[in-house]
Amino acid sequence: MGGSPDIQEMAVMAKQSPSANAKDTPLLHDDNNPIYLQLCARFKTAIAEGRMAPGDRMPSVRALASELGLSRGTVNLAYQIMAEEGYLEFRGAAGTFVEERLKKTSNAGSPRLVTGRARAERLPNIRPFQLGLPALDAFPRKTWNRLVSRRSRELGIEQLGHPQPAGLMALRERIAAYLAFSRGIACRPEQVFVTSGHRASLELIMRALHQPGDGIWFEDPGYPIARDFLVSMGAKLHPVPVDQDGLIVEGGRARAPDARFAMVTPANQSPLCVMMSKERRGELLKWAEEGQRWIIEDDYDSEYRYNRRPPLSLKAMDRGERVLFTGSFSKVLYPALRLAYLLVPPSEIDSFERASRLISAGCPEFHQSVIADFMEQGYFIRHLKKMRTLYAQRRQLLVDTMQDVFGDGVRAISPPAGLHLAMQFEGYRASSAKIATLAQADGFGLQSLSSWHMGPPSVDGLLISFTNLSSRHMAETLAQRLKAICMAADQEG
Ligand SMILES: Cc1ncc(COP(=O)(O)O)c(C=O)c1O
């Protein structure tokens, strides 16, 4: 490639800061702007300014790393990112080249590719490996749009007044029927309160039942959003460890015998995906009954268990009416709906109605009616069934790809359930917190397990979602990038 800049010229470009008018500016260690991203920015500027041209051959990773005094992992990661963003092309043994197609997309000499950051700005809430998202590409939008259109054509004046604070009765009836069928819960629609999300359900519980000073057992590790929300509401949280059988009830009794609430995820412990054993369920219900305490059962994604049928709920065993059951449409439909629900014992309906009138004027009814139609016409159960199969495949795709890319050093520690994997990586010195920070700076939506702990982590690793892995190529590209990030984290120390 006669016209390509040579290694020294490339190194000079890498040393020139885009914001310093091409003056030599050293690449500096910075947690918010890691060196590999600085490197990407400098090469992209060089391409945009025409100092590097489509078809130019890049120096080898080894040569550039040695020229710049950087680790190979750092340079490799920068190359991976630029390749994924369409700036570079790997041509196997022939080397790495500035993407030829940039010629076609260039405008007055500057490429108009969607950069990682620009893409993140366009799709700010859909990031690679992002936790908490269902498979958005597989949502039955056509059916949904048809139901939406029908409802919007039929909008009558009776729908223009105030919504019902506890939710649209048609939806409450559908939820009660679904809970009976799928979660083994016998209940009346009046016990169901529709809310604007899990936090709104928690707020309702706090308003209706929580007294100042009441302690709450909280799973450790456990869902940080609920944890931070409860703390912000003035709750006193007591971390209680979790093992392969779920929350350790004896541990809770030893640490906080006087607590009045326990917040648990018995179907799929969040984030370890273990199922609470029958014995522990019995122990927890006994603890609640003997002290007239409350259990908050968060049933956020119980539908997703891939090697056996989902277990019945804790609520289904609740003879003493001590369980407050919360569900959400975020993972079974989509999170932008902002709709969830709370099921309360019959004896507490009045106090929850009072609390719900106090804190909210109700949720918008339009989408409640669409969900009710979706459930009533059988689409909901069909959708869940389809998604269980899809997620089992995508989960396996992630396990296989990670194994291919990382080798034997990687292992999934969570059972086949939920919408993510908890994974441990051997052979890296960097903590999972450090790796997660670098990955997040690069646009990933994965998290470290340590950030889900209240105390020192009893188990560590990364939490990686597989739901939106729509192809093997995508899985491989992301796994390669993650590997390069792990190496860069090790080398940055
Ligand atoms: C543990 C847990 N509980 C509840 C929810 C539902 O939250 P929301 O209804 O606010 O989307 C989620 C969603 O990610 C979750 O991970």
Image: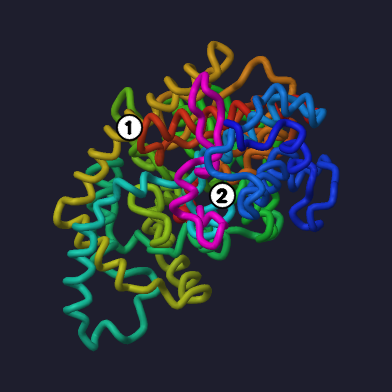
Question: Which residue lies under the disc numbered 1?
Answer: 310
Give the Cα separation between the discs numbered 1 and 2.
38 Å
Tell me: is circle 1 under 8 Å from ligand 1: no
- Which is nearer the N-term, disc 1 or disc 2? 2
Front residue of this view, candidates 299 and 371:
371
Q: Give the amino acid type for the residue marked by disc 2 in the picture.
A: Gly
Residue at point 32%, 28% (across, down): 393
Q: Is residue 401 left or right of residue 155?
A: right
At 38% from the left and 69% from the top, the residue drawn is 166
Q: Nearer the viewer, residue 346 or 447?
A: 447
Residue 13, image x, y percentages: 74, 43
- The residue pinned by badge 2 equals 116
* Total tally of numbered discs in the picture: 2
For the residue pair 65 and 472, the one nearer the viewer reads as 65
The quadrant where residue 64 appears: top right
In the depicted structure, whether residue 359 falls above or below residue 478: below
Furthest toward the left, the residue is: 377
Query: Measured from the top left, where is residue 218 in percent x and y?
Result: 61, 41
Reply yes or no: does residue 475 show up in magenta.
no
Disc 2 CB within 8 Å of nearest ligand 1 atom: no
486 displayed left or right of 478: right
Amino acid on which disc 1 is placed:
Pro
**Picture quadrant where residue 338 is located:** bottom left
Quadrant of the drawing holding the C terminus = top right
Where does the magenta region start and end? 85-113
* Residue at (58% x, 45% y) in the render: 53
Q: Residues within 10 Å of mark 1 (few under 14, many from 20)?
A: some
Figure coloring: rainbow
In the image, residue 112 lies in the stretch drawn in magenta: yes
